[in-house]
Amino acid sequence: MYYYHRYHIAVVFDAKEQTEITGMLNRPGCGWYQLYAYYLSPDTPLSAEKLYLSEKKDGYTFRLALLEFNIAEYRDRELDDSAINNIRTVLQLFSRTKAKVIIRFLYDWDGLALQNEPSDISVIKQHMNQAGEILNNFSNLIYTTQGIFVGNWAEMHHSNYMSTEDMTTLAACYANATDPSIYLSVRTPKQYRTIVQELKEHPERYEEYDIQKSKLLERLGLFNDGMFGSVSDTGSYQEADAAVTEEEKLAARNKELDFQDSLCQNVPNGGEVVSDNPFNDGENAVKDMQKMHVSYLNRIYDEAVIRKWQESTYTGADSLYQGQSYYNYITDHMGARYVLKNFSLSYKPSRKQSAKCTLELENKGFAPLYHNASFTITMINIETRKKTIIWNSETEAKGEQIVSLQGQQTISVPFTLSLSDLENGEYLFIARLTDKSTGELISFANKSLDVMQNGYVLGTMTIAR
């Protein structure tokens, strides 16, 4: 009888039904981006109009903004105080919004990079070092950067600086100038592989840059502004263009998609879609975005492709989206999209007085979370309001697996919960996924949000002795 009274606890657990919902929700750092372009001139502060201060804002519904800084007028000189202050002012403005930013510096908006770029690579390197000093103060604001300043529209083609050595030098310089937490990106998979191979075969050429400390190879991703425009993504995959037969072209394309499937599990990928054609039909686009791990796209370009997605009905395997448009599906699945699947708790009387818990969740998005996040489960005594974190990704063995869960993947996390010191009463379990840089709650695609608790209800437990 002593054992029974000492160790017997009556435990009743009522799991919250985890109903999945559609909608963009609160998912910072992914989705459609809005473009903001700034032309910088010596001794010229940006006006309110040039800063877009006079425009009616959309409330930053779109959680990403591409900021383009055209520095063509500095092709023969360093950035002056005016340029530096203008860049800083723009970043300060965006730091007051909910938007993360994508950064692109460039010398050309007209397809005339060969005449607009500096005549000496040392000027570009100086600009990179100056830009890095500014960007590093806003590292938490930056989702990724695009390019290495050169080429038409900074898309790394039609430039005097696209030799293997020049391209690698500029990538290494930009990495060295910027905080290791800031992602970088190049335009094509081949450019990525060329840089990696060059650094491996000729490290002596880049000794002035601390490649290891800058973590260049850990944060170098891709951007694709020719996405789905053709079998080669509008020249992004050169082998596909060079192939002769359609079968060979498709094989070359699939090889590059497989490459991105591996690489972009760890670094961002996105851009803009172009040229209405079968490669960007809804079904084909979704399939390839899953492999490419696309997390962001231009919200207005290509208008014809976006309109096609808006007007075509989703026909994929996800029953939740049947009858909706491909546009809605793509909007909801760019980047990471976490869904709580189930949370269970079971208890059998024992000396340890421990309950067995299992959490199951899925990332239904195209990509993982690329920036630091934290996942916690908090237990709240409903009467006393005492809160106890019972699972924390910062300290648990499987913590990193949850916050970096790949797209289209599910994870099950078992753990034990000691009940011996808990008072009789009712307890509420709350799950939270938060952006570590801002503390902002990242939405799960579930109905179980409790606004008062700023988290998602997993269930309730009642203890009686």
Image (spheres, rainbow, N blue to C red):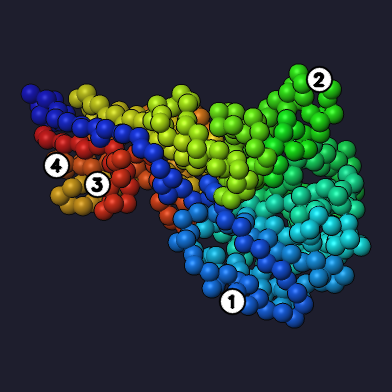
Give the SS element for disc 1: loop
In terms of sequence position, does the residue under pointer 2 or pointer 1 come before the other?
1
Q: Residue at x 37, y 45 (%)?
A: 432
Q: Residue at x 79, y 61 (%)?
A: 107
Question: Height in image: 350 above or below 369?
Answer: above
User: Mark 3 = which residue?
Assistant: 380
- Quadrant housing the C terminus: top left
In terms of sequence position, does the residue under pointer 4 or pointer 1 come before the other?
1
In terms of sequence position, does the residue under pointer 3 or pointer 2 come before the other?
2
- Percent position (x, y) of residue 7? 16, 29
Give the SS element for disc 4: strand
Instruction: Tell which of 371 and 51 is nearer to you.
Output: 51
In the rendered structure, which amino acid carries the disc numbered 4? Gly
Q: Could you tell me how far apart the alpha carbons at marks 3 and 2 are, in whole angstroms?
A: 64 Å
Q: Mark 3 and mark 2 in contact? Answer it, CB < 8 Å.
A: no
Q: Could you tell me how far apart the alpha carbons at marks 4 and 3 are, in whole angstroms?
A: 11 Å
- Percent position (x, y) of residue 160? 90, 53
Q: Quadrant of residue 349?
A: top left
In terms of sequence position, does the residue under pointer 1 or pointer 3 come before the other?
1
**Disc number placed over residue 245 in the picture, else none:** 2
- Answer few, some or many: residues within 10 Å of disc 1's Cα (few below 14, many 20 plus, some between 14 and 19): few
Q: Could you tell me how far apart the alpha carbons at marks 2 and 1 are, in whole angstroms?
A: 54 Å
- Answer few, some or many: residues within 10 Å of disc 3's Cα (few below 14, many 20 plus, some between 14 and 19): many
In terms of sequence position, does the residue under pointer 4 or pointer 3 come before the other?
3
User: Mark 4 = which residue?
Assistant: 425
**Disc number placed over residue 48 in the picture, else none:** 1
Instruction: Tell which of 350 and 210 is nearer to you.
Output: 210
In the rendered structure, which amino acid carries the disc numbered 3? Ile
**Disc number placed over residue 427 in the picture, else none:** none
In the rendered structure, which amino acid carries the disc numbered 2? Thr
Inspect this view and state whether residue 131 appears: no
In the rendered structure, which amino acid carries the disc numbered 1? Ala
